Image (spheres, grey):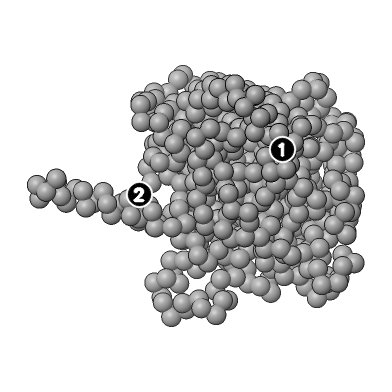
Amino acid sequence: MSSETNSKTETRERGTAKGRGRILGALFATALVATSLSPFVKSPATAQQNNAAKPNILVIFGDDIGQSNLSAYTRGLVGYETPNIDRIANEGMIFTDYYAENSCTAGRSTFITGQVCLRTGLCKVGIPGATVGLQKGDMTIAQALKPLGYATGQFGKNHLGDRDEYLPTAHGFDEFFGNLYHLNAEEEPERPYWPKDNEAFVKAYSPRGVIKSAADGKIEDTGPLNRKRMETVDDETTGSAIDFITRQARANKPFFTWMNFTRMHIFTHVRPSMRGQSGMPGNEYADGMVEMDMNVGKLLKALDDLKIADNTIVVFSTDNGPNAFTWPDAATTPFRSEKDTNWEGAFRVPAMVRWPGKVKAGSVSRGIVSGLDWFPTLVAAAGDPGVKDRLLAGWQPQGSTTTFRNHLDGFNQLDYITGKTNKSARNEFYYFNDDGDLVAMRDGDWKHTFERQDQPGQFDVWAHPFTPLRVPKIFNLRMDPYEHAEISGSMYDQWRVENAYMIALAQIQAAKFLQTFVEYPPSQRIASFSIDQIRRGVDKKIDESFKKRGLE
């Protein structure tokens, strides 16, 4: 977004996130941050022990995808079908109550670190030139899998910071080939008002190109991701992912591949030969979805051709809900509102998993599951079910120079997805907005909204602040999954009063969760799109000047 700006002068320290939420701020103001490390727990068995039994892992992310855009959910309601993505669901498990986050960077950071975005500071959408990015002390799935013998490759969109130290290959991935931002940021230099004569601005805020990097520190810029290249860049990254998978399969080495398509973030640019392929002339969004589905088909075919599909976990999901205000270049969801809000439409997304012989074909999950859960789940599937406890205590993996002490907010869902239990390991979900405020929580069927975005849509949902509620709103997401009752239900207020005691239960649960940020504080401050952080820094210096001059 061209209007987004981050403070490049703000010093970000590991510590509390002052002002990131009223409830959380009250806790931080009265608590001491724990700094001592517990005794380290012994590391898991190393890679070479029984590699053949370890499953390969392929995680595929779309961008801003809604449930309605996949025919596995709506049987072609939107005019086209996605047979290759549907295949993952048909041959595995599809999720009805699956939660990502409410924007791009948060949805990716929570998946790869297993921590809510407030802990990592990666809540705000990353833009060119921002100082915020994935920190050295926050472990990734890739880093947890390396001691187990996995080759690790990431392809496509990253969006976790654009400095070299934030690249995937600095955080456990052997290889990376992809872009670093949302698409509309990539094409900003082609805009007519781009200040191309302002050398300082161009140097500081121009997007980097499509990056190819390796764990040995080699970094190559393969050129800009301009509008023309956007037509085919997913072909490039899909091809690189298939090449990586092929090399590992032939070397008999288990792999973790994270494939991130640029589709379907704005703005959609499809090549001439793809236009109309959806059967909907003039609907380039639909054509882009069909193209993404074709690339998923290429990945699945590669697994089949290499005869490794039966030993490969395949996950398909996305980072957040639809960016509906850019319709018709936008996804579709049955849930209320859109990306960057507190409503289900921002967080509730499609997801499915396939693991032949382990996950029952055609099964449906109606339990609460989050993108946070894949970290402990996939690492457990690879042979290390104790990673969560080890990280709480402090763990220095074999071959690493970093001691990680992280609070994983994900739950191990391995028994759930493999049918050993019919109950999800997760009963709650915490909704953070891109400022790091806890705006809602779900506890079982009940959702409690603490702050709400009252703008009905358009870019206003990004520009306007959330409204804090003196009394939280409550919703029953089984009775009212689309959160319409407060709008259309004439008895909603009476029902809300009759069930007001539920608010106390929510407060108890939320307070317990928020207390974990005292012992496991955030890695960095969350970025801002405006000048508020700059202003706070200036005000601090003004106050210091007053003190020096005796003008308090």
Report the front residue among 410 and 213: 410
Q: Which residue is labeled 2 in the image?
A: 11
Report which residue position mark 1 lands on. Answer: 490
Front-most of residues 386 and 364: 364
Q: Is residue 171 visible?
A: no
Residue 303 pos. (x, y %): 84, 47
Q: Give residue 536's mark.
A: none
The image shows residue 65, relative to residue 193, as above or below, that is above
Marks 2 and 1 sit apart, C-alpha to C-alpha, by 50 Å
Task: Name the residue located 65 percent from the left edge and 24 percent from the top edge.
Answer: 498
Residue 137: x %, y % from top left: 48, 38
Residue 204, position as x, y percentages in the image: 43, 66
Task: Specify the quadrant of the image occupied by residue 292.
Answer: bottom right
N-term mark: 2 or 1: 2
Residue 336 falls left or right of residue 53: left
Under circle 1, the secondary element is: loop
Q: Tell me whether circle 2 and circle 1 mark residues in contact (CB < 8 Å).
A: no
Note whether 386 is above or below 78 in the view shown: above
- Relative to residue 351, is residue 209 drawn left or right? left
For label 1, the crowd category at 10 Å Cα-Cα, with few meaning under 14, some 14 to 19 and many 20 or more, is few
The N terminus lies in which quarter of the figure?
Answer: bottom right
Amino acid type of disc 1? Ser
The residue at the point 69 percent across, 57 percent down is 324
Is residue 482 something that shows in the picture? yes
